[in-house]
Image (spheres, rainbow, N blue to C red):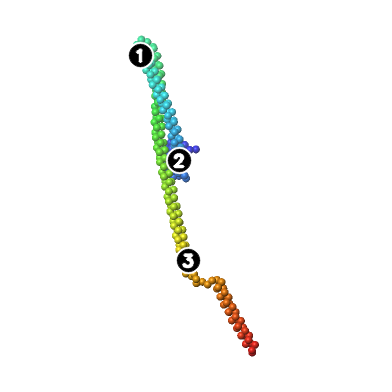
């Protein structure tokens, strides 16, 4: 089922309100334009048929008018020849044809009104279609602008992150440099691990010897008593 049920619905529609209520305005405006274009094709095809019918009716009117004039000419001829009876009969035929003339004229008037109405509706429909296309163009431009802004913001954020990481890496390199400088200042001052172990071993041996000597002294003194 289409967005519009009749052409009058299109003409009386509020495109802005429809787009404001739509979840996907770009998709909605495409559907609106498609239906308007299809309707416009149908209306123009109908108008073409009506115009063709009018031309046929106009030719028919011209023909019956000529027939009415011809019967009047025959009535005149009959009167000129003294045949009033034939003149009366001719005028009766003319009257019948003139009734047909009135019918065809009324048909033409109705057709002209229909054509005028179709022309007005086509104009209004075309205006609505132009408005919808303008809305579509505006939506497209707006969408592109938003996408561009999002892209720019993402780029700015990415650059900010890159800058932060760069500064962090610079800080790390600076710390590495300072630590390296500190380590270089202490180079040569440390005792080799194996040498330090040997010294601690000697210190332990000395401490044990002192303890052993103390015990011997104490024990020797006890034996002397």
The secondary element bearing badge 1 is classed as: helix
Mark closest to the chain's N terminus, 3 or 2: 2
Name the mark on residue 76: 1
User: Which quarter of the image is occupied by the C terminus?
Assistant: bottom right
Q: Nearer the viewer, residue 22 or 105?
A: 22
Seen at 41% across and 45% down, the residue is 141
Q: Which mark is residue 180?
A: 3
Secondary element under disc 2, as helix, strand or loop, is: helix
> Mark 2 or mark 1: which is in front?
2
Q: x and y percent of residue 120 in the render?
A: 39, 33
Front disc: 1 or 3 = 3
Identified at 44% across, 60% down, the residue is: 167
**Residue in view at x 64 percent, y 89 percent:** 224
Neighbour class for label 2 at 10 Å: few (<14), some, many (≥20)? some
Local SS, label 3: helix
Q: x and y percent of residue 199 in the render?
A: 56, 75
């Amino acid at each position: 089922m289409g967005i519009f049920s009749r052409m009058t619905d299109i003409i009386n529609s509020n495109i802005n309100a429809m787009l404001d209520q739509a979840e996907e305005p770009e998709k909605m405006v495409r559907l609106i334009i498609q239906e308007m274009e299809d309707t416009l094709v149908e209306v123009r095809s109908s108008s073409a048929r009506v115009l063709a019918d009018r031309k046929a009716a106009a030719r028919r009117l011209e023909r019956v008018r000529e027939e009415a004039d011809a019967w009047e000419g025959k009535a005149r001829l009959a009167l000129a020849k003294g045949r009033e009876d034939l003149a009366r009969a001719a005028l009766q035929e003319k009257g019948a044809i003139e009734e047909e003339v009135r019918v065809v004229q009324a048909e033409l008037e109705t057709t002209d009104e229909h054509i005028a109405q179709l022309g007005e509706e086509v104009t209004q429909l075309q205006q609505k279609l132009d408005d919808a296309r303008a809305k579509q163009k505006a939506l497209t431009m707006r969408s592109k602008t938003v996408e561009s802004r999002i892209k720019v913001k993402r780029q700015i954020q990415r650059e900010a992150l890159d800058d932060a990481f760069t500064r962090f890496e610079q800080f790390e390199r600076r710390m590495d440099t300072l630590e390296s400088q500190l380590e270089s200042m202490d180079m040569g001052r440390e005792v080799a691990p194996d040498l330090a172990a040997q010294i601690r071993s000697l210190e332990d041996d000395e401490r044990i010897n002192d303890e052993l000597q103390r015990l011997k002294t104490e024990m020797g003194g006890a034996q002397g008593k």
